[in-house]
Image (cartoon, rainbow, N blue to C red):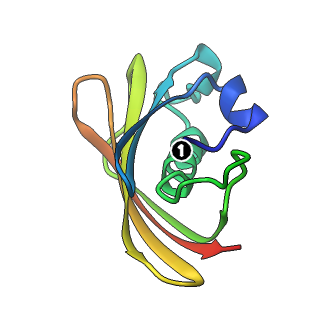
Amino acid sequence: MFIRQPFDEFLDMSYERISENSVKVTLPIQPLFVNSVGVIHGGVIATLADVALCNTVAPDADGKQKVVTVDLNVTFLKGAKSEFLTARAFAVKEGRNITHADCIIHDDQDHVVAKARAILFNQ
């Protein structure tokens, strides 16, 4: 089960659970996601990372998320020009109140374009 939110559905993201604490989220790229330099806007990449990272913790029975992001760090490694981006995220350490998670984002040629890490607060 994944967190279902209107914003994620608007972006047309697709989800795949890899294991209990890891996910793959794919985002098809729309022309409006490309900045004036001709690469995918960093905010779009950060959004994809945040969605993937929060989904490393399974939602409650009603599909509501159990965590919120308290710290998000995104490092951009390469300008992304791609038909889609794929984020692979996993929980590194889950505690009672805090979860640490990491994410790698690939383009459609499987090049790493960004990496991210988050600290998530378990509500």
Q: Is residue 8 left or right of residue 110?
A: right
Quadrant location, the C terminus: bottom right
Answer above or below: position of 46 versus 108.
below
Q: Is residue 105 left or right of residue 33?
A: left
Question: Which residue is drawn at the image coordinates 63% and 75% (left, top)?
Answer: 121
Q: Is residue 112 left or right of residue 4?
A: left
Quadrant location, the N terminus: top right
Farthest residue to the bottom: give it: 96
Farthest residue to the front: give it: 61
Q: Nearer the viewer, residue 66 or 9?
A: 66
Answer above or below: position of 86 versus 72.
above
Question: Which residue is drawn at the image coordinates 49% and 48% (left, top)?
Answer: 52
| Residue 110 in picture, x, y percent from top left | 22, 31
Question: Which residue is drawn at the image coordinates 41% and 30% (left, top)?
Answer: 85
Q: How dense is the environment of label 1, judged by Cα within 10 Å: few (below 14), some, or many (20 and up)?
A: some
Residue under numbered circle 1: 42
Q: Is residue 31 left or right of residue 104?
A: right
| Residue 72 in picture, x, y percent from top left | 55, 66
Q: Residue 30 is drawn in which quadrant?
A: top right
Q: Secondary structure at mark 1?
A: helix
Given the image, on which type of amino acid does mark 1 rest?
A: Gly
| Residue 32 in picture, x, y percent from top left | 65, 20
Q: Nearer the viewer, residue 72 or 53?
A: 53
